[in-house]
Amino acid sequence: MFGWDLLEAIISILLGILQGIAEWLPISSEGWLYIISVLLLRINPQEALSSALFLHLGTSIAAIFVLRKDIKDIFKKSGHEKEERVGFFILSATITTCLAGVPVYIYLKECLLPSYGKNLALATGFILLLVGLALKLVSSSQTKRRSFSSKYGAVIGLIQALSVLPGVSRSGITLAALIFLGYGEESLKLSFILGIPVTLGASLFQLRSVNISMFPAFISSFLFSVFFLKALLSLSYRTEPWKLSILFGFVAIAFSLPFLAFY
């Protein structure tokens, strides 16, 4: 995709930085990379899409690195009862996402015009705003905290499957669903863990079609993901869920506006 001259190496690194930041925000990271790669840098659309999906490898490895203790606690055989329940919750969500994502992609993506992607991106922001406002209006004593059951894992998996549609942010819709269902301060971290199998699979699928010159982008996406992921997790621990939902809602709306200009 890129040659090895200095300018193209810098562009590759900048694309990786963008992916490392956008992956964890309630925005479509593929959409932003597409806008910059195709419309601004004049890169072939198919190459741009393959590269965007490949860069998920760097962000996935970063998530595994940052959340390694949580992942180990969830999946080790001698884990506590709560960790074992979370493991089945994540497994149920992942399987449901894989089973539902393929037909959603095949049947619904063709029915939606490309221009609808901008509307879906905007809708994600408003959904997060509504969830935050709803939680603010309901007192904490009235909010029912959900268990980590396979049933609710499947519900989250179905919602996560919608992220195959253009403009839909996986982190945005899963975060909104987790907060709405009552998973509180653990919602953001759960959203990140849930995304690891899905994004890792998508990136590995693209390995054969990606040029080796994307390696600088891979490295920069990993490094910036580690930094940004830690910063967001720190923010989530110090912020009430309803405030976090509203904050991410405004971010999603703000970053969806360029789609309105370009399409």
Image (tube, grey):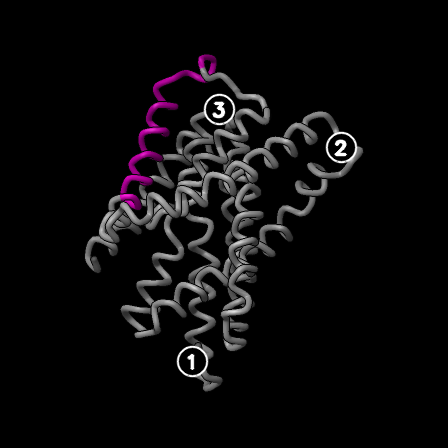
Q: Main secondary structure of the magenta part?
A: helix
The answer to if 23 sits in the magenta stretch is: no
CA gap between label 3 and label 1 equals 46 Å
* Front position in the image: 91 or 98: 98
Q: x, y percentage for residue 248?
A: 38, 41
Amino acid type indicated by mark 1: Glu
Q: Residue at x 52, y 27 (%)?
A: 183
80 displayed left or right of 127: right
For marks 3 and 2, the one nearer the N-term is 2
Q: What residue did someone put label 3 on?
A: 182
* Front position in the image: 263 or 8: 263
Mark 2 crowd level (few <14, some 14–19, many ≥20, 10 Å Cα) = some
Q: Which residues are magenta?
A: 120-142
* Front position in the image: 33 or 228: 33
Q: What residue did someone put label 2 on?
A: 79
On screen, 190 above or below 18? above
Q: Quadrant of residue 261?
A: bottom left
Outermost top residue: 142
Q: Quadrant of the C terminus?
A: bottom left
The answer to if 132 sits in the magenta stretch is: yes
Q: Residue at x 45, y 73 (%)?
A: 12
Q: Residue at x 43, y 35 (%)?
A: 159
Amino acid type indicated by mark 2: Gly
Outermost right residue: 78
Amino acid type indicated by mark 3: Gly
On screen, 125 above or below 203? above
